[in-house]
Image: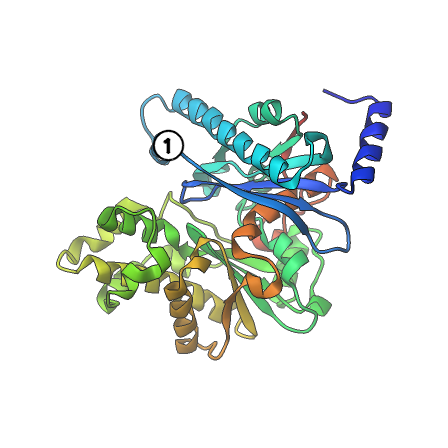
Amino acid sequence: MARDHDEEQELAASTRQTGTDGVYFGLMSGTSMDGVDGIAVQLRDGEAPRVLADAFVGFADGLRDALFALQQPGENEIEREALAASALAARYAVCCHELLRSANIAPTSVRAIGVHGQTVRHRPEKGYTRQINNPALLAEMTHIDVVADFRSRDVAAGGQGAPLVPAFHAQVFGAQDETRVVCNLGGISNITVLPPARTQAQSRSGEQAAAAAADGHAVRGFDCGPANVLLDEWAHRHLGAPYDEAGRFGASGVVNQALLNALLDEPFFEQAPPKSTGRDLFNSEWLDAKLAGFASLAPADVQATLTALTAVSVAREIERHAPECRAVYVCGGGARNPELLKALERALDQSGVSGVPVMTTEALGVPPHHVEALAFAWLAMRCVERAAGNLPAVTGAAGERVLGAIYPR
């Protein structure tokens, strides 16, 4: 519903008086499908993001099971997806109301909610990606504009639709005189290579982006392989736990080199960027097929080897695409796994990128569990301002595009 001019002026004056102009919410539910991370943040040009509140709202087992079932083709998918999307929107709304309460602000003070949705299929090679959600219902339940469906426009422009967060990483984590790598260890691992800000090329077309990436002056980013998606699966299977707390299960085992070699024998790991992946490839069926010849291995040894798989696959990509990097900053759920961080540092030392410190984004002033939700708040702002949100050098799209669809309050 459109607002008239007087109403817009009144709302703008009200938010200026309360000091909450430029407030956006970001919501992210990743491949672990255990819940949604939310952030309330004030975004202003030339200023660091100012976090007003954060929240986490878990998913009930029934919703999580429904989301897992939608990862693969099945009976009555259309209805099951619609019901799951509405259930998701209800949980997202709970998260938004918690943010409003914690930040002590009214819905009219929030410019928009940027919500990723839940990925159930990601097939850019077939021209589609599917993040389910019911943004119309979310707008109805929160009385806040909602920006959703960020990935499909990039895919329509010939891109991978992922990763989308490198543009935000460049805004927040870049340095003037050194190359940095930001590594997101979510369900899937991905890296963003941030060359020195003084050398970064601003790419306006797919052709210009490719040229800039080739000479190392563009921000680059891509998926590296599985991270928590397999670690959590194995921990749940053998511990009955949602994840490997502090990496202790993996630390109790020993890496099996033969299994690690078998896991790394996957064409995706040798594919050149731009590239993206997800549960469509790295899932329990893939893991079980790889384990077929290793039935005698202790479960802890498998967990140790899966930890090494994540570390080695990331380290190899850093060696290939950012050997000059001076530091690796980790965000995502894997940042809470100290054994995984140590494994990554070891893998880098054993590659051609030795002596590079691995730390979380906390060292740059941003808690690692905030990063992705912040990114989708920022992408919502870009959409509202009709500004591009993708980086063609990252996704392979034909050019810069405004990402997202707006559902007015």
In the rendered image, the quadrant that contains the C terminus is top right
Q: Is residue 153 visible?
A: no
Residue 77 image position (x, y, % from top left): 37, 24
Which residue lies under the disc numbered 1?
70
Relative to the observer, which residue lies in front, 7 or 275?
A: 7
Residue 185 image position (x, y, % from top left): 45, 56
Q: Quadrant of residue 104?
A: top right
Q: Is residue 254 above or below residue 227?
A: below
Say whether residue 327 is left or right of residue 19.
left
Image label count: 1
In the rendered image, the quadrant that contains the N terminus is top right
Q: Is residue 154 above or below residue 9?
A: below
Which residue type does callout 1 highlight? Answer: Leu
Q: Is residue 120 above or below residue 253?
A: above
Q: Is residue 314 above or below residue 393?
A: below
Residue 75 image position (x, y, % from top left): 31, 23
Say whether residue 148 is left or right of residue 5.
left
Residue at (58% x, 59% y) in the render: 220
User: In the rendered view, how is the structure colored?
Assistant: rainbow
Q: Quadrant of residue 382?
A: top right
Say whether residue 304 is left or right of residue 223.
left
Relative to the observer, which residue lies in front, 210 or 78?
A: 78
